[in-house]
Image: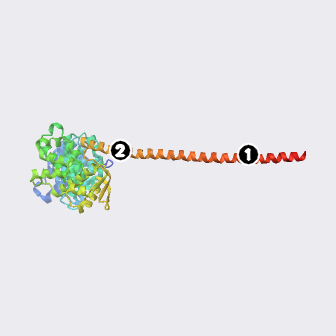
Amino acid sequence: MPGPSNTLLIEGSFDELADELAHYIDEVQKKQSPDSANTQAEITPLLEKGQKDEVLKKLVAGSDALNSAPEKEFIAAYNLLVHLVRQSTNLNKFLPRICQNLSNPIKSSPNNGAGLALSILTTIFNILPPTSEVRYHVFLAVLRVVRTSSTFDLLRPQLKNLDAWLAAWETDEEDQRKLFLEISHVAADAGEDTESYLYLLRALRTIPLDEVSTQDSHSLAIRALKAALMHPSHFDFQDLTASDPIQALRKSDPDWYELLEIFNADTLDDYNDFLESHESFLSDSGLNADILYRKMRLLTLASLAASTPSRSLPYAHVARALQVPAEDVEMWVIDVIRAGLVEGKLSQLNQTFLIHRSTYRVFGEKQWTEVQGRLDTWRGSLNAVLEVVRSERIKMAGERERELRELEGRVNGAGGAGAGGRGMGGGRNGAGGRDFDMGMD
């Protein structure tokens, strides 16, 4: 969509081009309603007086007729209108109406109308200065066209620029909320539930603290909470609990807030207790019981895995916590792994789930206690290992010392035997020597 700035090169004076466009609008209107074709007559005296803005006011008022212009003439006619409007210093006065017209159905081209409208809106967006607040209204019109034409993929690449645009336009919180909600609607209609929820949450965060008790804040909080609960792959509810409008539900809608707390930190047993005391809550609120039960079981299994010090979870414990038959345990473990809540592997032989990684849903005093217990267990295991290592080291040192003594004894024994042999040999050699000498005498 938005790209480098565009330049519209259209020759002719303002008066000539305005008269030409007015004539064209009248021609198009005559085909719809002959009696309403009077734009050219209305602007003629205004042109003579040099009242450009009044002329533009008439042209823009009649420009809705351009949505019935032939497809091959549509872009040229709108480009001419945009060119004329740009010559006014009051763009804010005229462009929003043009954008509104473009977001309406293009009657002359039911199949290609969205593409034609987006082409003109893109041109308008790009010819405006980056800091122009009018770009905000143009973008809203783009969103309306995208929503009616189910072309969210065309919008997706542009959303990365949204924060920079909002900063450049100096958009206030109310207008930001309006824009985020529109994007959320567009994404929801396109089946992009995750994107829709993210922008719904962003809209919720634009509500100031002094407005959290208003009806609009209440409605948006309930809508965001319901979207989070019904989203099949959304499991982290702390983004909601940190929101002021959601916190306001403690007083205005305690049942909704209690349900949020259950999904944020509690287990299936707590959820069942809630349902017993609020029998018609799900049906009255339009919540899908099957989706909530599945999500609650996955969250319960995640909590069970996170609170298991041994990292080995028997199938029987899973079945009891999830209230499912033993033969369904492996299916639920596979689902919780696919959901990214836990990592591990199944041991069918031992009927256990070996946990490699688990994530705490919330981290408070209870979780700190569990971590302390797990660290104590690890410390005990490490101490046991160190004791074994220390014992083996002492044992090895003793064996080495014994081996050295044995080696020294063998060496000393071998040395004594060698000295005696030399003495005896010397005696014999000495005696033989003396006998030889005596014989010589």
**Residue in the picture at 29% in, 44% down:** 373
Of circles 1 and 2, the one toward us is 1
Label 1, secondary structure: give it: helix
Whether residue 186 is visible here, answered yes or no, is yes
Question: Given the image, on which type of amino acid does mark 1 rest?
Answer: Gly
**Left or right: 157 as drawn, with respect to 389:** left
Q: Position of residue 245 (x, y in %)?
A: 17, 42
Question: Given the image, on which type of amino acid does mark 2 rest?
Answer: Gly
Label 2, secondary structure: give it: helix
**Left or right: 179 as drawn, with respect to 423:** left
Say which quarter of the image contains residue 46. top left
Viewer-closest of 213 and 35: 213
Cα–Cα span, label 1 and label 2? 65 Å
The outermost residue toward the right is 441
**Residue in the picture at 11% in, 41% down:** 251
- Could you tell which of marks 1 and 2 lies nearer the N-terminus? 2
Say which quarter of the image contains residue 146. bottom left
Residue 423 numbered mark, or none = 1
Picture layout, residue 302 above or below residue 364: below
- Image quarter where the C terminus lies is top right
Label 1: how many residues lie within 10 Å, few (<14), some (14-19) or many (20+)?
A: few
Q: Position of residue 418 (x, y in %)?
A: 69, 47
Q: Position of residue 250 (x, y in %)?
A: 14, 42
Viewer-closest of 382 and 418: 418
The residue tagged 2 is 380
Whether residue 11 is visible here, answered yes or no, is no
**Residue in the picture at 81% in, 46% down:** 431
Residue 407 numbered mark, or none = none
CB under 8 Å between discs 1 and 2: no
Label 2: how many residues lie within 10 Å, few (<14), some (14-19) or many (20+)?
A: few
Q: Position of residue 422 (x, y in %)?
A: 73, 47
Colouring of the image? rainbow
